[in-house]
Amino acid sequence: MDKNLEIIQQIFQEAIRLDCLQDQNIEVNYHSGSKRLRVEIAYQGNPTFNDGLSRSYSVSVKNSDLLNKVLCEIKALEIIDDDLLGD
């Protein structure tokens, strides 16, 4: 479980990093009853209509392979520099 805990900590760190560098909402939840970790990333679209893109993951904290997959997916997310219309 120590290996899995380290991966989970890295997932939290990446989620916080993305949250600080992007205009998006990130949730990371651990459900003790099912022993599952849920990560949801919601990119801001139009806040009035809540029409942004969202991506979510739900994985057992006992499955090292899937935890690593989620970590790799989160690390692979590109930081979007949306300056098309300027500030």
Image (spheres, helix red, strand yellow):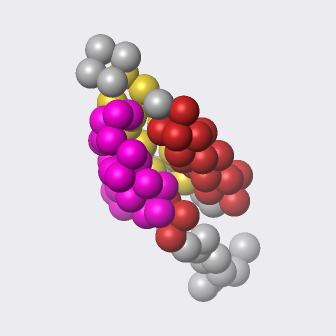
The image quadrant of residue 80 is: bottom right
Foreground residue among 12 and 61: 61
The residue drawn where x is 33% and y is 41% is 63
Check if residue 4 falls in the magenta segment: no
- Say if the magenta span includes residue 53: yes
Q: Position of residue 60 (x, y in %)?
A: 31, 35
Where is 45 relative to 78, above or below?
above
Q: Position of residue 21 (x, y in %)?
A: 69, 59
Judge left or right: residue 30 versus residue 78: left
Q: Residue at x 47, y 31 (%)?
A: 1
Q: Quadrant location of the C terminus?
A: bottom right
Residue in view at x 43 percent, y 63 percent: 73
Q: Which residues are magenta?
A: 51-73
Residue nearer the viewer, 65 or 42: 65
Q: Is residue 9 left or right of residue 49?
A: right
User: Is 36 or 21 nearer to us in this picture?
Assistant: 36
Q: Residue furthest left?
A: 34
Total numbered labels: 0
- Across and down, in percent, residue 84 comes to 60, 85
Residue that appears at 54% across and 64% down = 75
Q: Is residue 45 above or below residue 8?
A: below
In the rendered structure, the answer to whether residue 54 lies left or right of residue 8 reads: left
Q: Nearer the viewer, residue 19 or 5?
A: 5
